[in-house]
Image (cartoon, rainbow, N blue to C red):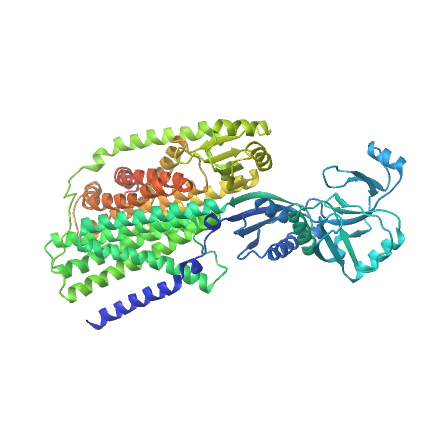
Amino acid sequence: MSKGLRNRVLLIVAIIAGCVLSVWPLDKRINLGLDLRGGMHLVMKVDTSKLSENAKSDAVARAMEILRNRIDSLGVGETVVQRQGEDQILVQLPGVTDRDSAVDMVKRVAHLEFRVVKEDPALFKDALAGKVVDGYEIKYVKGTKAEPLLVESKAVMQGDSVSDAKIDFDQSSFYPKISLTFNSQGAKDFAELTQKHVGERLAIVMDGDILSAPNIREPILTGTAEITGQFTDQESSMLALALRSGSLPCPMSIEEERTIGPLLGKDSIDAGIKAMLIGTLAVFAFMIFYYFIGGVIASFALFLNLLITIGIMGFISIMMPGSMVTLTLPGIAGLALTLGMAVDANVLINERIREELDNGKALGTAINAGYERALSAIIDSNLTTIIAAFMLFQFGSGPIKGFAITLTIGLMASLFTAVYVTRTVFMFLMEQGLIKSLPMMRLIGVTKIDFLKRAPFFIAVSFLISVAGLGSLVMKKDQAYGIDFAGGQVQEYHFAKAVSAEAIRRVIKDSGVKDAVIQQFDKAPENVIIRTSEDSYDKVQAAFKAEFKDIKIDTMRIEKVGPVVGKHLREQAVWALLLALAGIMIYVGFRFKHFDFAVAGVIALLHDVLIAMGLTVLFGRQIDLLVITALLTVAGYSINDTIVIYDRVRENFLRTGRKGTLSEVINLSINQTLGRTLLTSFVTMLVVFSLFFMGGEVLNTFSLTLLIGFSAGIYSTIFVVSPIVVWVQKFSKKSW
């Protein structure tokens, strides 16, 4: 073995070993996103409208610190508490699936006050009747009876005097109680308070409700106090936690919520991995069947591509434990798509080698020439897809960022495996004399089709399809958008046994929820999705518990997006699409030194995106963040075929010195690359079909959009880009 080949082999072996070490054991090296392991994603808005200007300046920072203290007390690992914008806080709680307790914990202001109760029947009667009683107001004791009490308007002490709060049990009632310990100043103030008001009742008020109002029998000089009431264990735990961590500076509301139950997370992992494995095996089988030895080498490279992608993710997780590199459900789809896209490079190389062999070159020379001539197109194709992935990372949420990261790492890995690893394998086989020829199947021979002549017909078809899709988008208005953009709430439940949609609709309507849309699936009638314009979780939960007492109901997911967040996400999606198209146009224009090529390519991408979006809505699906992810993926991937044709046009003009008009050379270039275009599209479709049929309900619309977009990309590359290049060039009068 030559020294150069030995060094290449050692480098590949070292990288494989490093990736294996980085991912082993897999369950500890790869961080799963909330959509796979369950948990909560909350965006909280801090309401500072009633605070003074001085208090507003650090209100969000104080709220974040208090939230961290509360979450840390729960012992939840790998949590995220981050500021988002001016007045929002992002909270992620992996593994937390008790939604009610978690929401209560993060929203509870926990403003504790001690107020003296006024035992004056006349004043009490006036206040209860609605008359203004100076210095006093009516407050209600929290509980089933809601007893009203007349208390002083001004608190005599507040919760900032409390240093600790623990749960004990009342020996007389056996209900939990909370034992408070005051700090040094608080103990002194509480002693003075109880000395001054012996024989009176002292109301302990939390967030406007009276928790209890015990009689002060004697001065309390120990620096402790008790809060009693008919608390459940869960209520007392949350109350003690809130008191220990301190009160929030102001109220907070949930602007965005995504709660994923463990059952949905497990189902998503099973479906995603199954779809990825089946798609991968289908790709391997086709490549080996079609390219024989070349296909075996390509399949080996694809396997390494998957290993290196996961290995890099594991390595980043080891080196930067708090990094955003997590495997999400869209990320699993990204792994599968990466394999489909990586095939593009392998097909391009094999087809280039075939051309060189057809021209009568020796095997070694043909292999070297094939790699050299395919390299520029491979790099350009991958970089344009990475531009789209970058925009997804910049403007996407957690799972979408996971998809963008996975796709980017996978594409970078594919450059190494497709170009470096496969060439090393060819070099080894050639040096050892193990291959003398490189047989390949040829389903598509040499064609001489005048594609530009047929272009007007296909452009007319594209126009009609685009009008139909966009017309559907306009007619459906807000119904065309999922809650990510329109706002509202989605609840998904799993019933132990199937319940009819009519029964569920009746129960929800009787609960007072008027605009609910009920959805069931033929394959899994036990799963029910409920869509409402407002937060109806509490009403739906109460109605289900009352009506379906004998049926176990698991909460699969709760997603809620407020109108402000929905508008913001919609704006971000538009910017992501526009900036991705602009970035691709600039890159293509720079690489090919022809602005008309860049304009034509982006027009074709816009065509693919509009058709994919319009037909997705026409087929009864809604546009959400995953659909935007699919559209950006379509934009990044569809340009690949265009770049390959552009590269061949440039080669025909500059390298071979071929004579002819631009129309003639474009037609020739399309015919020369037609087999590669159809092959790579077919192989990528194998992966997308597996995601569509076996990837689960969450990825179904995502994969449908990809199918439409990739299909549109096949013929737009041939019948849309080419005539636009010719027409634009006529106006620009620029030649090669």
Name the residue at the bottom extreme: 3
State left or right for residue 533 relative to residue 251.
left
In front: 273, or 283? 273
Instruction: Provide residue 66's location: percent of width, then percent of height.
Output: 65, 55
Q: Can residue 231 be seen by looking at this rendering?
A: yes
Q: Which residue sits at x=35%, y=43%?
A: 691
Q: Residue 207, relative to residue 184: is it above or below?
A: above
Instruction: Choose top left, top right, bottom left or bottom right for residue 13.
Output: bottom left
State left or right for residue 209 relative to residue 415.
right
Q: Which residue sits at x=67%, y=52%?
A: 242
Instruction: Provide residue 135's location: percent of width, then percent of height.
Output: 85, 42
State left or right for residue 541 relative to residue 458.
right
**In which quadrant will I find the N terminus?**
bottom left
In front: 625, or 715? 625
In front: 131, or 122? 122
State left or right for residue 60 relative to residue 358.
right
In front: 120, or 3? 120
Q: Which residue sits at x=82%, y=44%?
A: 153
